[in-house]
């Protein structure tokens, strides 16, 4: 089978295409013939970080068909599935034609859901779900009506996590406001279902959000806390929560404390790989339900444009994500990929 591997850290040039013998799944494992692999920022960041202790296949997310199962598996050969965290602390990512994955990290994909959608779930949708549930003490899957009466602000609504957060929040009954940086991205956020869109480069975002939500927003899904801390303090309602899932700078987060104290605001920092197991399981269940309901979508018309590459161009796919390509970058792994 064909696989992309790297044995040293560095730029996209360390990625190489090799031929490998597929591994047989053991107890608690399934082997998936990967049709489409999704690329996330953590994929290229991991490649450029600590050197792996051997050959590493990159990419956490993917979708395909089960082609072998370990003893006593709950899956069957031929099941359509999506996988998450495939390369986290493991050598078997999704940039290969056949990958062995722990059963817990494999989820059934409905027949009417595309492999493109399956490969675009994983990190973005699970992160979005975790952020939307950040205010809760008990981890529960999202469902229709769960966020009724709440106003959610999604920072960066044209990104992959922002897109999923909009769709999930609207499905759960929230009123969704999102911020974007251009008219083109505003169109994408509206296509995703955002009720209100604020272009922070064209107007005063705090003032605009204040007009749209004069009593304040209840939750912020935050992609850039260093730039937005002051804004978040202004627009949040008392007792509100900021769910931080990313940052675009290595600089320490610094902000005036008093505005947050006065409103009794809370910060919640999230990393999907390391959240407690119960939270991750709830997120998987919530995303699975949303997929079954047809809530999560991909494509330009859904607000998440797709940029495609073939497996041998995985380095270009990583570079596209690193350079900030809008939407979702996908890799067609098998010949009958999409």
Image: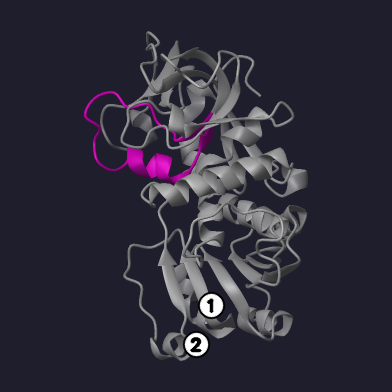
Q: CA distance from mark 2 to mark 1?
A: 8 Å
State the quadrant of the N terminus: top left
Q: Is residue 330 left or right of residue 112?
A: left
Query: Residue 190 in the image: x percent, y percent?
Result: 76, 59
Q: Along the line of sight, which residue is nearer the eye, 329 or 196?
A: 196
Q: Which residue is mark 1?
A: 240
Q: What colour scheme was applied to this rendering of the protein?
A: one colour
Label 1 crowd bin: few (<14), some (14–19), many (20+), radius 10 Å: many
Q: Secondary structure at mark 1?
A: strand
Q: Secondary structure at mark 2?
A: loop
State the quadrant of the C terminus: top right
Q: Would you say residue 253 sits in the magenta stretch?
A: no
Q: Along the line of sight, which residue is nearer the eye, 220 or 315?
A: 220
Q: Are marks 2 and 1 in contact (CB under 8 Å)?
A: yes
Q: Which residue is mark 2?
A: 263
- Please say whether residue 36 is visible from this viewpoint: no
Label 2 crowd bin: few (<14), some (14–19), many (20+), radius 10 Å: some
Residue at figure coordinates x 60%, y 56% from the top left: 162
Q: Would you say residue 44 sits in the magenta stretch?
A: yes
Q: Is residue 277 above or below residue 105?
A: below
Q: Please give the count of numbered marks on the rendered protein.
A: 2
Numbered range of the magenta stretch: 36-62
Quadrant in the rendering for residue 201: bottom right
Query: Residue 8 in the image: x percent, y percent?
Result: 25, 31
From this viewpoint, which residue is outermost toward the left? 53
- Please say whether residue 15 is visible from this viewpoint: yes
Q: Is residue 116 above or below residue 1?
A: below
Query: Residue 126 in the image: x percent, y percent?
Result: 53, 48
Residue at figure coordinates x 21%, y 29% from the top left: 53
């Amino acid at each position: 089978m064909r696989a992309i591997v790297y044995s040293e850290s560095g730029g996209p040039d360390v990625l190489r295409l090799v031929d490998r013998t597929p591994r047989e799944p053991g107890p608690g494992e399934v082997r998936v013939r990967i049709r489409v692999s999704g690329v996330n920022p953590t994929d290229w960041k991991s490649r450029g970080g600590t050197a792996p202790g051997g050959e590493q296949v990159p990419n956490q997310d993917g979708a395909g068909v089960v082609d072998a199962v370990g003893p006593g598996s709950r899956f069957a050969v031929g099941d359509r599935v999506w996988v998450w965290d495939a390369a986290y602390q493991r050598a078997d990512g999704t940039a290969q034609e056949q990958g062995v994955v722990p059963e817990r990290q494999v989820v059934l994909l409905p027949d009417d859901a595309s492999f493109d959608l399956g490969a675009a779930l994983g990190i973005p949708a699970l992160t979005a779900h975790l952020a939307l549930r950040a205010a809760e003490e008990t981890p529960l899957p999202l469902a229709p009506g769960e966020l009724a009466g709440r106003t959610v602000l999604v920072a960066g609504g044209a990104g992959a996590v922002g897109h999923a957060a909009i769709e999930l929040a609207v499905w759960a009954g929230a009123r969704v406001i999102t911020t974007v940086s251009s008219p083109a991205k505003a169109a994408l956020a509206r296509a995703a279902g955002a009720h209100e869109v604020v272009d922070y480069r064209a107007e005063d975002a705090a003032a605009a959000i204040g007009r749209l939500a004069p009593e304040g927003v209840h939750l912020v899904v935050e992609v850039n806390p260093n730039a937005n801390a002051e804004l978040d303090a202004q627009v949040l309602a008392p007792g509100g929560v900021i769910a931080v899932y990313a940052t675009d700078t290595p600089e320490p987060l610094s902000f005036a404390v008093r505005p947050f104290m006065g409103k009794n605001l809370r910060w919640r920092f999230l990393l999907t790989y390391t959240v407690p197991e119960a939270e991750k399981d709830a997120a998987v269940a919530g995303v699975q339900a949303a997929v079954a309901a047809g809530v999560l979508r991909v494509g330009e018309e859904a607000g998440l444009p797709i940029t495609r590459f073939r497996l041998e161009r995985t380095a270009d796919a990583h570079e596209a994500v690193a350079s900030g390509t809008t939407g979702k970058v996908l890799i067609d792994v098998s010949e009958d990929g999409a």
